[in-house]
Amino acid sequence: MDFKRYLITAALPYANGPVHIGHLAGCYLPADIYVRFLRSQKKDVQFICGSDEHGVPITIRAMKEGITPQDVVDKYNTIIKNSFEEMGISFNIYSRTSSKIHTETAQAFFLNLYNKGIFEERESEQYYDESKEMFLADRYILGTCPVCGNNNAYGDQCEKCGSSLSPEQLIDPRSALSSASLVKKKTKHWYFPLDKYENWLKEWIVEGKKDHWKSNVYGQCKSWLDNGLYPRAMTRDSTWGVPVPLPDAVGKVLYVWFDAPIGYISATKELTNLWSDYWCNEDTKLVHFIGKDNIVFHCIIFPAMLKAHGGFVLPESVPANEFLNLEGEKISTSRNWAVWVNDFLKDFPDQQDTLRYVLCANAPETKDNDFTWKDFQDRVNSELVAIFGNFVNRTFVLMHKLCKGRVPKMHNDIVDVSDNGLADDIVATKLKVEQNIENYKFRDALYEIIDLARKGNKYLQDKAPWLLAKTPELQLENQQKIDNCLHVCLQLTANLAILINPFLPFTAKKMCFMMKVVERMLEWENAGRLDLLKVSYPLRAPELLFKKIEDIEIEQQINKLKETQKTIKMSETTDKMDNTETVRQEIKLEVHAPKQEITYEDFAKLDLRVATIIGAEKVKNADKLLKIELDLKTEIRTVVSGIALHFKPEDIIGKQVTIVANLAPRKLKGIESKGMILMAENEDGRLIFVSPLEKADAGSEVK
């Protein structure tokens, strides 16, 4: 079917913490690649997302931080939104489910089903905390896991062994809010009769989607359908969420998995008055990008809701990815075992495309994959730097050296097989990339682009124009060969910019700047052309597209994870001693307890001095290092300090600091560093100088 418009959604992230690389690899990066590809084809496309700001994880985070749920979602909505923007995830709108328009849309959806008599009202017994006077959602219930014996398993899942649970399966269930034993009380809720849509879902999924849904998506859906569906409660007892719009539903909210997917609709309403064109016309292609843990909600529950309501399009595809692990272990937000996107952007500024590249090249498209920092370094250095970046850089350097900085002409009378062969490779690669993206095989598409750059390197090496320039007796003939070689290489460079744009948009933009072309050249219809750069057109000097990842940078990231592992082990040890949340928090604090006791004689060995910063500059090829000149009154001392990500050189001139003056010298990046500046660290990771309260004489001893 030819679609007139495209509606692309990415799963709404919970606004109870930052996003990590598993989130990016799972759905946001694949969705962005697909959307950028559609836009380059001039398709009518809307890319929809927003924060999921209701549900139990939000209230649990609020309790842990001692703030309100609204404070939580306001804080993390900003962090998440900024991380997506910095990573180039190009939503048309990033909304939030705490907005007024969402409340109105979700309530209207609920009332539509209610007025049709679709819901079933049921009374059931649920766990109740008498001391807090409230019913408890599954995540508010703790107990012993019947599978692994973990004493702090939640009512829906044991995070130690990963088993899915229900509160009734827990041994000795208790309240996560008060640690009190629980009682059961009757409560009324509204159930969606999912079982009544089982036959329709079987026809729609099993018969209609088998050939064009990913096997993992189809398989999980078929398994659910084969096991039989049953009614699911679409309301909860809570004060946080979209209130159930019925007079006898005080203290009840919409179940987050009823509320959240409607967020796609409300966000589109917020974006455009033409929202119904995208949601209600059959010539719209609706695609949900999600992780595998959301398959059932997007492929069974939400479509059944849309069918019951009527008037909405159904998803054409749901290209769910599997999970991305970290250094061999499952990513866990609660255990802080993750690479947070906002932290990555601080540690690797202006390197968004390196992360986009590695997460796509290693995407968990068909099975769980593992992210390791060593693999990150290897892929960046051996593929982006050594293949793609190397080809573009060599082409520009040789063009400036051998062709006076202008696009040379093509001498058709001496075109050879290798020239035509590379031209054919460009056209063939365009078709392969196109086909792979349309089939949601982004990893394969990216491989084809890198392979084309690899072929460009081989072509350039075989032609060796630098050697042709060394034979002046054949100057005219050889210059024509040089012209042809570099003309082909420059046209390939322009094509690489177009092909790589959906994947690495910051890189494509930089390449356009170097080629002095407008970004309109990146439109997909231009891929495969060999006349993108006009003859005699002057091009800018080359810039390195990617920076090599140094061993010290990887070592720092691995050390971060090692510290996290220590924290996790200490927490697990403490959980065996005492199961209460209070003790868990105390142990968390003890991770940063004072170091081993020392004697006065140990301390007396340190020569601590006040110094005044009189000069500072960045160390070349070291993003995190500053070379700092210190006035100690009796001498000027040079110290190399890893604080460049926290301070600008010009901002610290004149500041007084405390240094360890008798530390043995060591060389960093070829600079001898004589001493160490003392720093403190805030809760948010920001560094602060340890300085005297009042101005002191440079060189003063700290006692």
Image (cartoon, rainbow, N blue to C red):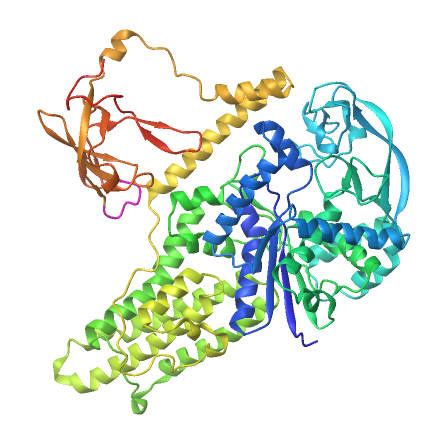
* Quadrant location, the C terminus: top left
Write down the quadrant of residue 641 in the picture: top left
**Residue 307 or residue 67, whichever sits in front:** 67
What span is colored magenta in the figure? Answer: 620-625
Q: Residue 206: where, in percent of width, then height?
A: 80, 61
Write down the quadrant of residue 618 in the picture: top left
> Residue at the bottom extreme?
413
Q: Residue 643: where, in percent of width, then height?
A: 30, 37
Confirm whether residue 290 shows in the render: yes
Q: Main secondary structure of the magenta part?
A: loop
Compared across the picture, whether 697 is left or right of 361 comes to: left
Instruction: Decide: is 479 above or below 47.
Output: below
* Quadrant location, the N terminus: bottom right
> Residue at the top extreme?
600
Residue at the (27%, 7%) spot, across then down = 600
Residue at the (37%, 48%) spot, across then down = 349
